[in-house]
Image (spheres, rainbow, N blue to C red):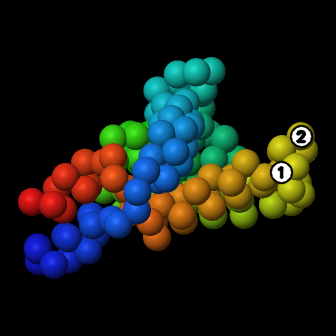
Amino acid sequence: MNNALINKLLDTNAGWGPLALRIPVGIIFAAHGAQKLFGWFGGYGLEGTGQWMDSIGLSPGYLMALLAGGTEFFGGLALIIGLLVRPASAALAFAMVIAIFSVHIQNGLFMSNNGYEFGLALLAASVSLIFSGAGRASVDRLVAAR
């Protein structure tokens, strides 16, 4: 792969601000992914999540659960450690667009009605990290500096 492309992907001039987004948003995504993949934190695991996804028209459900869970879990971990933050954020933003339009949009904005409020906040944080990069306290910055 081209070094210029790698540097562009990893480089960031952002200061400490992205860290304030990366850590909590990464924890939230990783926890939601763990619910889907492993059934942790009260989740249903791949089988249960896959059956639910099939029931709402996201088929094949098991594969969709694996893709969504994997994106959230590993993308969340990437945000936490600050590794490949831009591509992880892009994948997470895409997952939030799918969640908003396939599950939440018909319920309106507010979370109290299972609306898209929370998904929209996670989408905004993910898009922000695509533009800013990982920031000063990140593995991306260390790798790009080499």
At x 89%, y 40%, the residue is: 112
The Cα atoms of the two marked residues, 2 and 1, are separated by 7 Å
- Percent position of residue 16, x then y: 43, 50
At x 89%, y 57%, the residue is: 108
Q: Is residue 63 visible?
A: no
At x 51%, y 35%, the residue is: 27
**103 lies left or right of 11:** right
Q: Quadrant of the C terminus?
A: bottom left
At x 26%, y 55%, the residue is: 140
Instruction: Specify the quadrant of the image occupied by residue 100.
Output: bottom right
- The residue singled out by tag 2 in the image is 112
- Percent position of residue 110, x then y: 87, 49
In the foreground, 36 or 138: 138
**135 lies left or right of 52:** left
In the foreground, 135 or 93: 135
**3 lies left or right of 106:** left
Q: How many marks?
A: 2
Q: Eyeballing the image, is 95 above or below 7? A: above
Q: Secondary structure at mark 1?
A: loop
Q: Is residue 41 visible?
A: yes
Q: Residue 98 — which label?
A: none
Name the amino acid type tagged 2.
Ser
Q: Quadrant of the N terminus?
A: bottom left
Q: Are marks 2 and 1 in contact (CB under 8 Å)?
A: yes
- The residue singled out by tag 1 in the image is 115
Label 1 packing within 10 angstroms: few (<14), some (14-19), many (20+):
some
Name the amino acid type tagged 1.
Gly
